[in-house]
Amino acid sequence: MSDANPAFEPPPPPLPPPAARRMTSIRIPGIILIVLALVCVGLGVAKVLPGGVGTGLLMGLTGIVFIALSFVVLPDVPPDQHLSTGEKLAGIFYEPTRVFRSLRSNPTRGAPILIIGILNAAYLTAFTHRLTPERIVNYTVDKMADTPFIPPEAVERARTQGLEDAKAPAQRVNNILKAICGAFLGVFFIAALYLVALIAFGGRINYWQSVAVVAFATLPAALISKAVSFLLLYLKSPDDIHPIMGQETLLQDNLGILFSPKDHPVLFVMAASIGILSFYKLWLMAKGLKEGGTKVSSTAAWGVAITLWVIGLLLVVSITALFPSFIS
């Protein structure tokens, strides 16, 4: 019997789905961080590098996180509009919606985190030089002595060791490395919280999208705060600067000016969270979640941003209630 349809050809087999994209570029920096961490720990144990153990452990943890996150899949989203890293860094101040939409398909995150870490390290170095290590360490240790469950001998050991570490030239390098690694770990952790919270609110966002949103939403407030703090650091008398609270910022754009941190520490902390920059950052975070996520409604974005802001405030208030002397 002849073939009824000799021209028939079977359809080709379906093509395999494209391989998922991953952030493999951060594996090499992760390996380098782990190697440097081992060197720092070794020098710290040998008493060659003061504070090297703590710095090395933080660098090692950062390197491990880098390698682990290199296996996380990148978002599979059609590109909306392409912006260079420089355009994103500048545009986040005057066209954040466009920047966040670009981050949806191309979640750049390294540059803003690095800038935040360098700003923190530079300000802390200038702050320590301006107020002197002796005043900062002695003030901190004196507040430790007011804590009931810390024995006096531990307080004096902390004073001696703190002064030795603060005066060591290598401590400046340690502070820079800690600030940069801390910035990366902080953004990675907060991004994970936003990811989980947004899923709970019915939204959909890739982890790297969440990292990019947190990094770029944090950058403007951090840059403004540190720029003003640098200026105030040299305009104000060192005697008028708080040795602990001033390490974060000297900008007073919030209602904390209505309360004395010594007399009402809890009320001071709560009022200090209500300010221009804090609401600016909250607004950027909500907009970033909405525009930078795969599928996020405005209600979900604002709900997540406000919820985590309240949780963070309650955490800070709880710590202040336990250790009120540190801000007095």
Image (cartoon, rainbow, N blue to C red):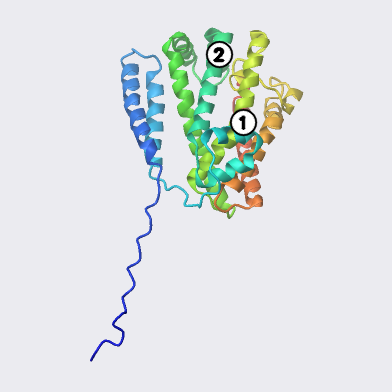
Closer to the camera in the image, 117 or 272: 117
Q: Residue furthest front?
A: 7
Please identify, in this view, whether the residue under mark 2 or under mark 1 is nearer the observer: 1
For mark 2, what is the residue? 126
Q: Secondary structure at mark 1?
A: helix
Instruction: Tell me where residue 8 appears, x and y as whole percent.
Output: 32, 79
- Image: 304 above or below 119: below
Q: Residue at x 74, y 23 (%)?
A: 257
Task: Find residue 148 and name its label.
Answer: none
Residue 62, by quadrant, is top left
Q: Check the image and name the residue furthest to the left.
A: 1
Q: In this view of the protein, can residue 216 be seen by the observer?
A: yes
Specify the quadrant that holds the N terminus.
bottom left
Left/right placement of residue 298 relative to residue 36 reads right
**Which residue sits at x=69%, y=19%?**
262
The one of 225 and 43 positioned closer to us in this rendering: 225
Residue 155 x, y percent position in the rendering: 49, 14
Q: Residue visible at 39% across and 14% down?
A: 50
Could you tell me residue 284's position as x and y percent? 64, 39
Amino acid type of the residue tagged 1 in the rendering: Pro
- The residues tagged by marks 2 and 1 sit, at their Cα atoms, a distance apart of 21 Å
Which kind of residue does numbered mark 2 sit on? Answer: Ala
Q: Which residue corresponds to mark 1?
A: 220
Tell me which numbered mark, 2 or 1, is placed earlier along the sequence.
Answer: 2
**With respect to residue 289, does 159 lie above or below?**
above
For the question of whether residue 315 can be seen, the reply is no
Crowd tier of the residue under label 1, counting other residues whose Cα lies within 10 Å: few below 14, some 14–19, many 20 or above: many
* Position of the C terminus by quadrant: top right
Q: Secondary structure at mark 2?
A: helix
